[in-house]
Amino acid sequence: MSNLHDFSADTLAGKPFDFSALKGKVVLVVNTASRCGLTPQYQGLETLHKAHQAEGLEIVGFPCNQFGGQEPGGADEISAFCQKNYGVTFRMMDKVEVNGAGAHPLYKWLVKAAPGLLGSEAIKWNFTKFLVGRDGNVIRRYAPQTEPGDLEKDIVAALKAA
């Protein structure tokens, strides 16, 4: 697989989604969790989504239970939590693994395309973010602690890029 548009995954509603539908969009891919100290980042992600969706930004959340068991629920529970607590309207995918042999193929590609600190390919925690350009290639990886609002400058630059 050579870029984001080559992948597919199931949505939180259990429907298949082909990432080729996002050709020409700037995409922020985030592994999420409902019971994490960083969970309030959902609000910042939703704010970015609302502010820049019309310009071509797509945010894609991937719930993951690999970090401290902080996403134990099923799809219905995750969806209800995101709606009730944060009014999430951006795309949420089915729960996946982001590390190890069972990692979703998209995440295997993302960590190779944008290694973390000291070249590490592992996702360290919930809310690791990957900004992907309109061409489907990774622009940058962001640490879990990086607040969504701190990505706005990079997102705007990616949206303006041809």
Image: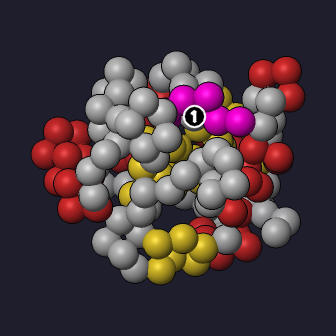
Q: Position of residue 128 (x, y in %)?
A: 57, 34
Q: Residues within 10 Å of mark 1 (few under 14, many from 20)?
A: some
Q: Position of residue 70 (x, y in %)?
A: 35, 35
SS category of the residue bearing label 1: loop
**Numbered range of the magenta stretch:** 122-127
Residue sticking out furthest to the front: 101
Depicted 160 relative to depicted 15: above or below: above
As rendered, which of 84 and 98 lies closer to the eye? 98
Q: Is residue 152 visible?
A: no
The rendered magenta stretch, by its main secondary structure, is classed as loop
As rendered, which of 2 and 27 lies closer to the eye? 2
Question: Residue at label 1?
Answer: 128
Q: Position of residue 6 (x, y in %)?
A: 73, 73
Q: Quadrant of the C terminus?
A: bottom right
Residue 6 painted magenta: no
Is residue 130 rendered to the left or right of residue 145?
Answer: right
Q: Residue at x 78, y 37 (%)?
A: 121
